[in-house]
Image (spheres, helix red, strand yellow):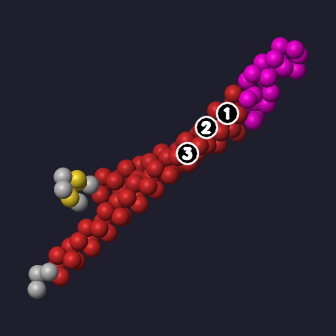
Amino acid sequence: MTTNGFRSDNERLLTGATQLTAAGEQARQIAARLQRELAALGECWGADAIGRSFAQRHVPAAQSTMARLDELSEQLHDVGRRFADTAAAYQQVEHDNAARLRGTEG
């Protein structure tokens, strides 16, 4: 679609949407596997003073990192949906404009 110097490539938008959605799913799978692997390891730093000190700093940072990985997956899916929605909107505008032009050819 081209309008007053603006051009959109709907096929590229749809390709990008598919790629971003796939990347989001891959990120979700990686995060899930990482969570399983870390859970299987358990709290391997020990219960002594040094282990507790390590845990005090490590656990919140690890939880924050895992939350960010989950957010990354959601954000990639969201951007993919936005690309697809944008492509659909541009296609609809093109369709509507073409119909209007055909209506004026009488």
**Identity of the amino acid at label 3?**
Ser
Dot 1 and dot 2 residues touching (CB under 8 Å) = yes
| Coordinates of residue 66 in the picture (x, y in percent) | 65, 36
Q: Which residue is mark 2?
A: 68
What is the magenta range? 38-60
Locate the N terminus by quadrant.
bottom left
| Coordinates of residue 105 in the picture (x, y in percent) | 11, 81
* Left or right of residue 19: residue 70: right
**Identity of the amino acid at label 2?**
Arg
State the predominant SS element of the stretch in magenta: helix
Q: Image quarter for residue 42?
A: top right
Q: Nearer the viewer, residue 102 or 23?
A: 102
Q: Earlier in the sequence, mark 3 or mark 1?
A: 1
Dot 2 and dot 3 residues touching (CB under 8 Å) = no
* Left or right of residue 51: residue 90: left
Task: Work out whether 53 lies above or below 68.
Answer: above
Q: Which residue is mark 3?
A: 73
